[in-house]
């Protein structure tokens, strides 16, 4: 990843000057390997720098994949462009104008230029977030929106997008299955491993996403439950049961067993599970079991590793130790030694 040296954009109000955030916590998390992140940028934003003549006005477009719960947040900040966010899997919390919104898979938000907002409340959650930010050359109150030439909406439709961004209630748009397709295609384009994205395709998809905002607004169904909401609630209730009844972790769950408990086919259960957690059922269960194990060790560091492994649902203490080391960064014995040292 590179970061182009550029003057930080700023906004002049009557009594203050605001500077655009470079989202430093996200950059550090990517550098430390805590999230998979790929972004393409102009100006001061983190990512692979684009030539000045390639989609000018595109501040940043990218995604992050947080496969575990994070210990950082993008705290209150402002940016110069209209910002679009999409929750592809897992969940995310965004706050705008004092409102906290929990995003589920298929939700998107639109944030007007220079609006105060934060992402990750209290910290970034497990999930995939896709974003794009378009510079509209706004540097003071009442500045007209100046759209890049590659945004090909009619002038009337651009005005409608402006109205939605400026006058909307800053809630999430719950997109239908058909309307999430441009976001899914954008994520595919950004994730190409062997080459840079096709930026003609990126431009087309961003135009489609702006049109999706208009379609969703016109349909008046932005906040209606999607056809998948019931299955999501069933899987969410299943996950909450692990918190309400930690003893359920001891069961040697298989995907078919979990699917049966939720009254779903294994394939449909796996899909809904991954959407909600950004993990496979086994990955998620291992993480929950290890978290419970650390809580039990903190309460009693004299417990035997074998009994602890059995209590949280691992078939063998060897596999428990392997997963513990992978997720915690220490073996169970090293973790216990650190606990005793800290006492």
Image: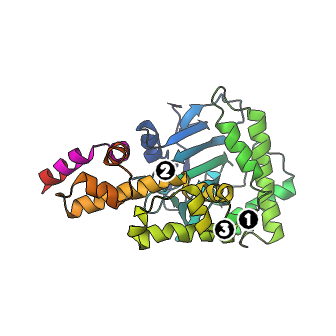
Decide whether the magenta segment is chiefly helix, strand or loop: helix
Q: Looking at the image, is mark 1 or mark 3 earlier in the sequence?
A: 1
Point 29% across, 61% down: residue: 295
| Residue in view at x 43 percent, y 58 percent | 123
Q: Are marks 1 and 2 in contact (CB under 8 Å)?
A: no
Magenta part of the protein: which range?
324-337
Secondary structure under the numbered disc 3 in the rendered image: helix
- Across and down, in percent, residue 343 comes to 12, 57
Query: Which residue is the site of mark 2?
Result: 283
154 and 229: which one is in front?
229
The residue at the point 44 percent across, 62 percent down is 251
Mark 1–mark 2 distance (CA, rounded to whole Å): 39 Å
Q: Quadrant of residue 227?
A: bottom right
The residue identified by callout 3 is 231
**Distance of label 1 from label 3 (alpha carbons):** 30 Å
Q: CA distance from mark 3 to mark 2?
A: 20 Å
| Residue neighbourhood size for the residue with mark 2, other residues' Cα within 10 Å, grouped as few (<14), some (14–19), many (≥20) | some
User: Where is residue 69 drawn, in percent x and y?
Assistant: 44, 54
Figure check: 253 above or below 6: below
Which residue occupies the extreme top position in the image? Answer: 194
User: Of the residues under marks 1 and 2, which one precedes in the sequence?
Assistant: 1
Q: Position of residue 339 (x, y in %)?
A: 18, 53
Mark sitting on residue 164? 1
């Amino acid at each position: 990843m590179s970061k182009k040296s550029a003057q930080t954009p700023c906004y002049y109000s009557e009594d203050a000057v605001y500077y655009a955030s470079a989202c430093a916590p996200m950059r550090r998390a990517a550098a430390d390997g805590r999230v998979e992140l790929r972004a393409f940028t102009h100006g001061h934003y983190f990512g692979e720098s684009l030539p000045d003549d390639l989609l000018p006005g595109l501040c940043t477009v990218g995604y992050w994949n947080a496969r575990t719960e994070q210990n950082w947040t993008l705290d209150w900040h402002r940016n110069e462009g209209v910002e679009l966010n999409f929750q592809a899997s897992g969940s995310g919390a965004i706050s705008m104008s004092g409102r906290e919104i929990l995003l589920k898979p298929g939700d998107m938000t639109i944030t007007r230029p220079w609006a105060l907002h934060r992402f990750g409340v209290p910290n970034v959650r497990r999930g995939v977030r896709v974003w794009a930010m378009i510079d509209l050359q706004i540097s003071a109150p009442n500045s007209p929106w100046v759209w890049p030439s590659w945004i090909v909406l009619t002038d009337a439709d651009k005005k409608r997008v402006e109205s939605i961004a400026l006058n909307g209630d800053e809630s999430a748009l719950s997109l239908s299955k058909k309307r999430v397709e441009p976001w899914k295609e954008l994520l595919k384009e950004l994730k190409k491993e062997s080459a840079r994205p096709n930026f003609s395709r990126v431009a087309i998809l961003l135009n489609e996403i702006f049109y999706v905002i208009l379609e969703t607004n016109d349909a008046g169904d932005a906040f209606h439950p999607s056809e998948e909401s019931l299955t999501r609630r069933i899987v969410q209730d299943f996950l909450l049961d692990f918190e309400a009844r930690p003893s359920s972790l001891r069961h040697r769950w298989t995907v078919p067993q979990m699917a049966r408990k939720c009254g779903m086919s294994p394939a449909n259960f796996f899909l809904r599970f991954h959407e909600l957690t950004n993990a496979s059922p086994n990955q998620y269960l291992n993480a929950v079991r290890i978290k419970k194990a650390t809580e039990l060790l903190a309460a009693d560091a004299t417990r035997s590793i074998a009994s602890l492994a059995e209590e949280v649902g691992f078939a063998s203490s060897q596999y428990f130790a392997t997963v513990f080391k992978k997720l915690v960064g220490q073996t169970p014995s090293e973790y216990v030694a650190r606990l005793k040292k800290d006492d």
